[in-house]
Image (spheres, rainbow, N blue to C red):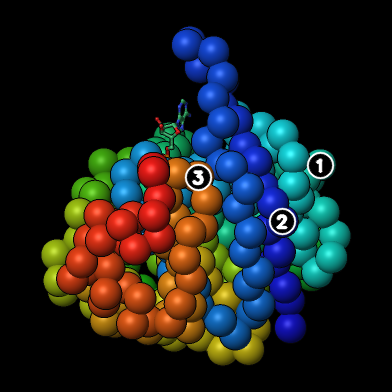
Amino acid sequence: MTTLVINDLHVRIDDESGHKEILKGVNLTMKTGEIHAIMGPNGTGKSTLSETIMGNPRYQVTSGDILLDGQSLLDQPVDARARAGLFLAMQYPAEIMGVTNAEFMRAAINARRPDDDPISVRDFIKELDQNLALLDMNEAMAERYLNQGFSGGEKKRNEILQLLMIKPAFAILDEIDSGLDIDAMKVVAKGVNSMRGDNFGSLIITHYQRLLDYIEPDVVHVMMGGRIVKSGDAQLAKKLEAEGYTGLRDELGLDI
Ligand code: ADP
Ligand code: MG
Ligand code: MG
């Protein structure tokens, strides 16, 4: 079992207008075997949390810690965090010219294996074919430049393909359902559910309860004003969908 602990995390971003504190003391503990969901209004810091866990240097941790099995990740760059087993499906996946999707995935898989034991071409292709079929994806997708000219839905599906190929310990999925029609969302859910098990944990960020009908979370957190203000089981997402964030603000007496 692997444990990811976010401990009183404060994060700041610098932009033209100076700097602002976005995360104001986030606490979260996740274990492999668990699926957690985070919901929350726009601009509340959900993507900031994901980028910070993964190590995007634009996001400055001013206090608190991020620990993987008790070891701080704060001084580790993105690639080291990926090797340690973290994976982020970004809200807006980047397009990368000159690197095919297959090349990218093979490099990412091999980065997590010993130098003298890269995945064989045969095994790679076998797994790739299986996962393309599972996700209802065209084989040609693997040979295209990463995300180049992919539709919004194709990008999201492709993030799940990478997830299935790379097999991280923890996957953070930032609005993986945005821009997906219901069929594509079911495919995405099928991919994530196929990863479920003792060696996999996920943090699913979503605006909509709908995705959680297909990927049932063990824990649901609500983030508002840069903090997790409430945690509960899957019922919390349903309640939120029914009552909105205003209802929760009133219930908790929050002024954010
Ligand atoms: P969410 O994902 O919950 O919608 P974000 O984490 O994207 O929220 O944003 C939280 C706040 O931080 C917003 O006010 C947003 O404008 C600001 N912010 C996020 N990323 C950046 C950035 N790279 N540069 C400047 N401001 C940012
Ligand atoms: Mg947003
Ligand atoms: Mg976001």
104 in relation to 217, above or below: above
Q: Find disc 3 in the rendering and name its residue.
A: 226
Q: Amino acid at mark 3?
A: Gly
In the figure, residue 156 lies in which quadrant? bottom left
Q: Find disc 2 in the rendering and name its residue.
A: 7
**Direction from residue 111 to residue 217 in the image, left or right:** left
**Direction from residue 90 to residue 11 in the image, left or right:** right
Q: Kindly report the distance in space between the C-alpha atoms of the residues bearing marks 2 and 3.
A: 14 Å
User: Visible in this render: residue 159?
Assistant: no
142 in relation to 182, above or below: above
Query: If you read the primary sequence from the N terminus, does the residue marked by circle 3 or circle 1 appear first?
Result: 1
Disc 3 within 8 angstroms of ligand 1 (CB): yes
Front of the two marks 3 and 1:
3
Q: Find disc 1 in the rendering and name its residue.
A: 75
Q: Amino acid at mark 1?
A: Asp
Q: Residue 141, image x and y in percent?
A: 32, 58
Q: Amino acid at mark 2?
A: Asn
172 in relation to 194, above or below: above
- Neighbour tally class for label 1: few under 14, some 14-19, many 20 plus, Cα within 10 Å: few
Q: Residue 92, image x and y in percent?
A: 37, 43
Q: Residue 169, image x and y in percent?
A: 64, 72
- Neighbour tally class for label 2: few under 14, some 14-19, many 20 plus, Cα within 10 Å: some
